Amino acid sequence: MPTDEDKRYVSLERDAASAASAIVSSKDVLVIAHIDADGISAAAIASRTLERLDIPHEVVFVKKLDDISIDMINKSRTSLVWLVDLGSGYLSSITKQNVIVADHHVPDPTWMTGQTSLYEFSGMIHVNPHTHGIDGSESISGAGVTYLISKMVDEKNKDLAYLAIIGANGDIQDKSDSRLIGYNRKILSDAVENGDIVADDDIRLFGRETRPLVQFLQYCNDPVLPLLTSNNQECIRFLSELRIELKRNGSWRAWNDLNDDEKDNIKISLIELLESSGVSGKDLMGEVYTLPKFRKGSELRDAKEFATLLNACGRYDDAPVGMRICLGDAEALNEASKNRSEHKKQLSIAMNFVKQSNIIREKRYIQYFHARSEIRDTIVGIVVSIRVSLIVILTAVVAHHVQLPLKPIQFLFCDAKAYFSHQ
Ligand SMILES: [Mn+2]
């Protein structure tokens, strides 16, 4: 007997199959993708799928669907436009004929009510878990929906499943249960079957492949490790008490360089540490996803690190390089790392600028700064989150209501507790 969940999955798959037949019969395609890790993985899946069909296509990455990108879609002369990891919120703005929206965000409610005829008339195919009663925030990502379509185009595209797992990790869909759930489990089993992903139970701190052990503990803030987080000396002491060698053959050891006994000792001590301060050690452990075809010590070998690399590409207007990494272009990895160190440099310049130029203005409950063109819009959010701990970012409001001559880089942040208790 199929469960209700099975039925929901089947109806999602039916929409994916309609999208697949529209793709197969298209002459040329414009792919529009979101710039984060999920969007970049989705774009890689879409691009490879079209390449295998010999369909000419172009991929354009956008931060969001603003008037300019909606205009680009509506005026596109390609026989099909395929949106991945975005679009569901803007269905009623899309007037172009033959559009596929492969997304997992909550759909535009105005489009949902009574506009089904438009759906058929315009040839819009909307593939979204929400319209089938599946939770798009955790069950499947934008890359997952794109993968589903790709698999309907050709079963052989199952070899792209690992990209959908990276996308799901990028969107932190493994958060609530410390493992992937819902439709993502089906995608995961495709990737495991291909030998592209190994799923293990292990510690879920970031940087298992590349972070030296001390930094592995020191930079962990989810969960915060009592005494250890942000305390370099304590981390060194903690590891040396457990007789863990920090370096071997001249290079820093990472988590995945440890043997099972060493790993177990650290896990037990960390769980004790957390539980002694009343925090459940459960959050520390869960499922982790390794890509065994990449070499040990490479950030591409761990799904979280891979996704973080893609997010960094997106944040630095470098999403096409991220997509090339997904498609196995070895040179792209070098390019990305060059661009990333540039990103770090820009970040420290931006931090210094905020510190030294005295631009932070304080109101009673609100402080803000307007960086004008001094800080790239893609990194100003990070600067803000480093500067203050509790933030309410009202970018959209500010961008719309304050007519600024330059880029509308303006953030308001406030102590939300104080602010709301005075409402
Ligand atoms: Mn997404």
Image (tube, rainbow, N blue to C red):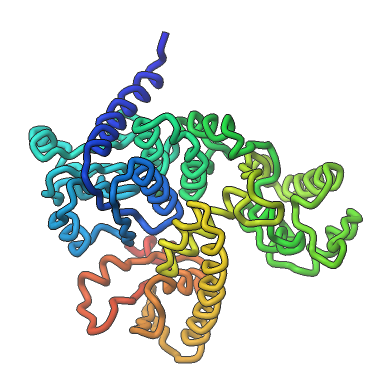
Query: Which of 281 and 279 lies nearest the eye of the viewer?
Result: 281
| Residue 160, image x, y percentages | 47, 40
Q: Is residue 227 left or right of residue 343?
A: right
Quadrant holding the N terminus: top left
What residue is shown at x 71% (from left), y 64% (from top)? 215
Quadrant holding the C terminus: bottom left
Query: Which of 155 and 401 lies nearest the eye of the viewer?
Result: 155
Residue 79 vertical placement versus 153 (above, below): below
What residue is shown at x 20% (from left), y 44% (from top)? 99
Q: Is residue 269 left or right of residue 403?
A: right
What residue is shown at x 52% (from left), y 77% (from top)? 342
Residue found at the very far front of the displayed protein? 54
Residue 221 appears anywhere in the view: yes
What residue is shown at x 28% (from left), y 50% (from top)? 56
| Residue 143, image x, y percentages | 41, 44
| Residue 33, image x, y percentages | 33, 54
Residue 192 vertical placement versus 224 (above, below): above
Residue found at the very far bottom of the displayed protein? 357
